[in-house]
Amino acid sequence: MLAKAHEQGELRCAEYAAEAAARAGAALDAAISRLEALARVNPAVRPEEIAALRNERAQLLVAIGNARPRMDALRLVANPDFLSLRR
């Protein structure tokens, strides 16, 4: 059961990581685009701000890609019917 739980955890972690990367990438891409558009009309927006946001996006996507499931705790719930099967 533990091996199956670990396998399922790996699958779900990959799914969640892919979804999180897509959402984070989209949100930060929108913010970068907004800053770039603002920089074209407002000289107060420094190129360093845009570069910092791009760097943050890159680091975040790397961190999300390195996410792994942790099996810190495992809870087994058994009802009396299951326990009566012990012999």
Image (spheres, rainbow, N blue to C red):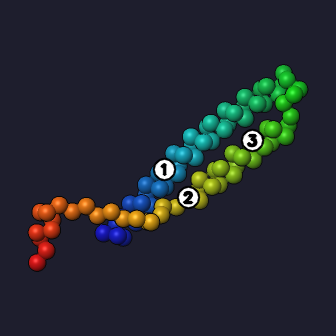
Counting residues from the N terminus, which is met first, the one under dot 2 or under dot 3? 3
Q: Can you say whether 25 is above or below 85 in the image?
A: above
Q: Earlier in the sequence, mark 2 or mark 1?
A: 1
Q: Residues within 10 Å of mark 2 (few under 14, many from 20)?
A: few
Residue 35 left/right relative to 46: left
Residue drawn at x 52%, y 51% is 17
Amino acid carrying mark 3 in the image: Leu
Q: Nearer the viewer, residue 76 or 22?
A: 76
Q: Which mark is residue 26?
A: none
- Secondary structure of the residue carrying tag 2 is loop
Residue 64 locus on image (x, y percent):
59, 53
Give the amino acid at mark 2. Ala
Q: Disc 2 designates what residue? A: 67
Horizontal side of residue 75 vs 16, given as left or right: left
Residues marked 2 and 1 touching at CB (< 8 Å): yes
The alpha-carbon separation of the residues under discs 2 and 3 comes to 21 Å
Regarding mark 3 in the picture, which secondary structure is present there? Answer: helix
Tag 1 residue? 16
Q: Is residue 53 above or below residue 42?
A: below
Q: Which mark is residue 53?
A: 3
* Occupied quadrant, residue 3: bottom left
